[in-house]
Structures are given as C-alpha cells and as structure tokens.
Image (cartoon, rainbow, N blue to C red):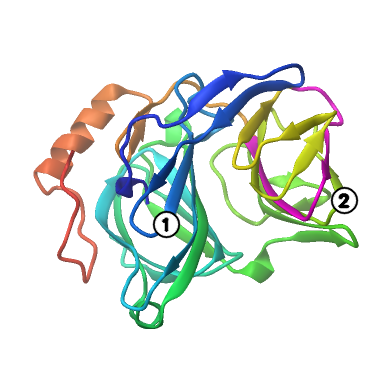
Amino acid sequence: MSDLLNQTDTCRCKQGPSPPILYLLVPEDKDLGGFSVRRLLPAAELKSVGPFVFFDHLGPAHFAPGQGIDVRPHPHIGLATITYLFEGEILHRDSLGNVVPILPNEINWMTAGRGIVHSERTPPDIRSTGHNLHALQLWVALPTDDEETDPAFFHYDENELPEVCDSSKSIRVMVGEAFGVCSPVKTWSPTFYAEINLKAGGSVTLPDHIEERAVYLVAGALKTRGTLLPLHTMVVFDRSPQIEFVAQEDSRLVMIGGRPLGKRTVWWNLVASRKELIEQAKENWRNGRFPKVPGETEFIPLP
C-alpha cells in the first residue's frame, strides 16, 4: 500500500530519554482522502528494526458507500510484505495469479524476491455498502542470498495463528516464536511480530531473546519503567531483560523485531542490498518487463 504515499521519510526520530529506550519514532499523519496513514519506518536516523524496513499504520477510517481504496498494480523486489487487518477487507491480486480477500486477524505474506506485481483494492460488495478500514502493512528485507528468490504468496487464516490468553490479555503471535508458542508463518530470517490486547491494569513483558525489538502503541495507554509511551509511537529498546508494559487503560500494541540483515536501499517499492538491483528493476518496470496481474489493466508509473 506504500504507493499511496510520498516515499520520503516522514518520521521524526529522537534518541530515547533513558535506557532501555534507544529511539522514539514519531510519525507524521498524512490524510489520503478519508483515512490517515502513519509511517514509522524507515525513519531519518533509523532505517530498520531487525529485518523490518517499513511500517505503516492505516486508519482507522470510514468509507462511505461507493468509496474505497484502489492501489493499482505496482512492483516489488527484495522484500516480503506482511498485511494485517484489525478491521475491514482488502482484495489482493498479484502476478502469480492469486486473488485473495484479506480479512482481520489473518496474515498475508507476499515474497517479492526477484520481482512481483500486485494490487490492493476495496472489494465491490464492500465498496457498495460503505465500510471501515484499519490495518498495518510491514515490509521485511530478504537476506542477501535470497533477495532474488522466486516470488511467492502465502495466506494464513486466523485459526492458524497461535494465541495466548488469560483474564487480562490476549497475545497473537503472527510471526516467529515467543510466549511459549510458534507461528506457522514461514520466514527467510529470524523475525518476530505479535499483536497484544491488554485490559486496563494488564501487563506483558517484551521477549528477551529477540535480537532487535520495538513496540508500537496502536491504541490505549502504556507505561514501562515509569515512562508513559505516547500513542502511535514506536519505541525501540535495547537488550535489557524483563521490560514490562502495564496498560493504563484498555490497550492494543504490536511488537516487532528479529535479526538485522545489514544495510538496504529502499526506493519506492523496491528493496535491495545492491543499488544495481534497484536500477535494473526501475528499468524493467519502465519498459514493461515485469509480469502482469491477471484481470488488471491499470498500473502505477515509475516515479
């Protein structure tokens, strides 16, 4: 969905006030005609957390009947996209021939590899009645040895993603292993991604084994070690153990992290360890050499 946005860094990145906080990533809201988008990664001073090189928070937004999103076909290389909805529905189409409705609490993992093209649109039946949309879209860079792998798409239903629940919280481990459970989502490098819902007074501890890690507050109010975390802010932590978060009210947060993969170039929707791969992809898209999305006639021109 990144092609809806200006591709320049829109986040303000500040050093944290004290350990164990390394950075506070503060987004700038952008109005895209009916819904807001907040970009956390890449930031001016911090380009990645673990393998994550892109983090967008979309909505929550309401679309009147007849309105919706129309992200025309566009290319990706060198990354995998992870789309996760809290509310609403998006229809995914790609150049592999996949046509998949993306629904809340599911994971859709699209590996671009050497090149894939996809579109994201509001389905016609949802568009006709009006709807709400609230989602996250993240990108992970692929390891250098795998960034030109075959493209692929994998869909995981809600009941495939493990949950850990008690009276004060629910934790869905979307990617990776933590909290005593392991997600079935196949990854290219050690990657962690979880959604946590806390009731007021509930608490959760950041897993210690994650190499690089961050928390994003989607809704509510959280405190850790006496520090109140600002809403819609990503907090990047050091390796201090037993970092606990306590909800000051009913709250929703996500945790991300994993093993860093080294420097990557991110240009438009393209990610690579070598700039020549970006230049080749630009030329291929400009000259129509990427595969087409069946059923689509539109496309987004190269910026």
Quarter-wise, where is residue 118 in the image?
A: bottom left
Q: Mark 2 points at which residue?
A: 202
Q: Which percent across, then down, holds residue 65?
A: 36, 78
Relative horizontal placement of residue 266, taking residue 104 as reference (left or right): left
Residue 207 in sight from this viewpoint: no
Q: Read off the magenta span.
A: 239-257
Residue that protrudes farthest toward the left in the picture = 287
Q: Which percent across, then down, holds residue 35?
A: 42, 57
Q: Which percent across, then down, holds residue 275?
A: 28, 23
Q: Which residue is drawn at 19% across and 36% down?
A: 282
Foreground: 43 or 161? 43
Q: Which mark is residue 137?
A: none
Quarter-wise, where is residue 63 in the image?
A: bottom left
- With respect to residue 89, does 129 lie above or below? below
Marks 1 and 2, how far apart at CA:
30 Å
Image marks 1 and 2: residues in contact by CB distance under 8 Å: no
Q: Which residue is drawn at 36% across and 48% down?
A: 150
Magenta segment: does it hold 254? yes
Relative horizontal placement of residue 19, taking residue 90 as reference (left or right): right
| Mark positioned earlier in the residue sequence (1 or 2) | 1
Q: What residue type is labelled 1?
A: Phe
Q: What residue type is labelled 2?
A: Gly
Q: Residues within 10 Å of mark 1 (few under 14, many from 20)?
A: some
Q: Which mark is residue 35?
A: 1
- Screen quadrant of the C terminus: top left
Q: Which percent across, then down, holds residue 299?
A: 18, 56
Q: Residue at x 44, y 51 (%)?
A: 36
Disc 1 vs disc 2: which is toward the camera?
Answer: 1
Q: Total label count?
A: 2
Magenta segment: does it hold 246? yes
Per the image, label 2 sits on a secondary structure element best described as: loop
